[in-house]
Amino acid sequence: MRLAARIALKVPAIQRVYNERNDLRRRLDEALDRQGNGHLGRYSPFWHFNASFDPEAVVRAHAGASVTADPDYLTNFLGVKIHPRYFPGLLDGRGGEVEDVPLPANWHADLAEWGAALRAVDLARGTFTVMELGCGWGCWLNNTGVAARRRGLDVRLIGVEGDRDHVAFGHEATAVNGFAPAQVALHHGLATARSGTALFPRQETGGSHWGLEAVFNPDAATRARLLAAGTHYEIPMRSIEDLSAGHERIDLLHIDIQGEEAALVAATLDVLARKVAYIVIGTHSRQIEGALFDTLLPAGWLLEIERPALLAIEPGGPRVTVDGVQGWRNPRLLPA
């Protein structure tokens, strides 16, 4: 048998060994991370990022010194309370726990994203206004809002979310975490470059699915079919200009809109340059990451931290297993 043929026969077995090795490493790192032993899990991909600042130092500096447990809520290292029913099946039974500093990650985000978001808090002065596109239960509204409040900043929270149950979670979570209604503006809709309408998928139990994808500006036939089937409901599309009305400055814009982030940034560069001091973007593909580089770098934005999307190499091509993250500073509003 020729050498090439012998190697070809062994490739599936070799691939299985690699897959098993990678799966075991992933499960070990996840177990170590859950136990708060991130320093033992240095093989974790979440330790590998590029940054112009020290995100671990930033995150540690924000850890609450006197965080107390609440029997009904999971409480994180900042003192933010999260009800387990927001994530059924993931946070079940974790009421009463207090989480350690997420090194290099926790169930929700990794060190790069935590560091980027809290970096924006550190750079704010006097006031802190955060806008979260695709806010869910208000994760980054609550986390950065609580951190900014501890710094003595005047906090304003702006969120937009397509799932109506998640909007209700957001109202509840911001209230539980001590924000007055006057500080909070939560919008049921989708953040886009222009106004319009979209159809958003229904789910039976709020929190069962995160990252649902909307149908933007559907044609008449698609709209009628999906509404008649009861699988979707209609919601407004809201522009960043509209959402930020009444606010001269957005200290942090967090974008996680299921693959539309590059298109949104490219279409809104003008308002971003005028109003937004810092952007943290959840990226859903390597192509999107490259498109963001092509858009923001020539426009003068400074990339301060990035961890690329994590991939699984499969026969059909690469598949994103964990979204990437990028943190960008606007030197017009935040000079060095």
Image: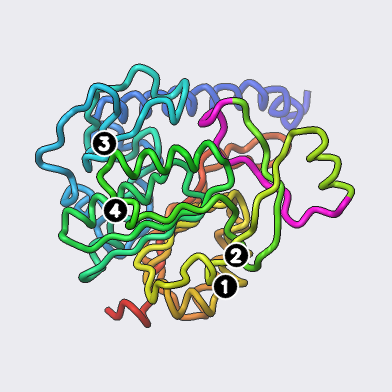
Q: Position of residue 246 (x, y in %)?
A: 42, 72
Q: Residue at x 30, y 33 (%)?
A: 41
Residues under numbered marks 4 and 3 in contact, where contact means CB atoms less than 8 Å apart: no
In three-dimensional space, the C-alpha distance between marks 4 and 3, rounded to whole angstroms, equals 14 Å
Task: Tell which of 15 and 291 is nearer to you.
Answer: 291
In the drawing, does residue 302 fall left or right of residue 207? left
In this view, the residue in front, 260 or 18, is 260
The residue under label 4 is: 145
Instruction: Identify which amino acid the numbered label 4 is placed on.
Output: Gly
Residue drawn at x 72%, y 28% as measured from the top left: 8
Q: Secondary structure at mark 2?
A: helix
Q: For mark 4, does the 10 Å Cα neighbourhood hold few (<14), some (14 to 19), or many (20 or more) residues?
A: many
| Residues under numbered marks 1 and 2 in contact, where contact means CB atoms less than 8 Å apart | yes
Answer yes or no: do the residues labelled 4 and 1 have beta carbons within 8 Å?
A: no
- Neighbour tally class for label 3: few under 14, some 14-19, many 20 plus, Cα within 10 Å: many
- CA–CA distance between discs 1 and 3? 34 Å
Q: Which residue is mark 1?
A: 268
Mark 1–mark 2 Cα distance, whole angstroms, equals: 6 Å
Dot 1 or dot 3: first in sequence order is 3
Find out whether the residues at labels 4 and 2 contact each other: C-beta distance under 8 Å: no
Mark 2 Cα-neighbour bin, 10 Å: few <14, some 14–19, many ≥20? some
Give the residue type that dot 2 points to. Answer: Leu
Span shown in magenta = 205-220
Mark closer to the observer (4, 1): 4
Residue 103 against residue 124 in the figure, above or below: above
Q: Secondary structure at mark 1?
A: loop
**Residue 264: which numbered mark, if any?**
2
The answer to whether the residues at label 3 and label 2 have Cβ atoms under 8 Å apart is: no
Q: CA distance from mark 3 to mark 2?
A: 31 Å
User: Is 67 part of what is drawn in magenta?
Assistant: no
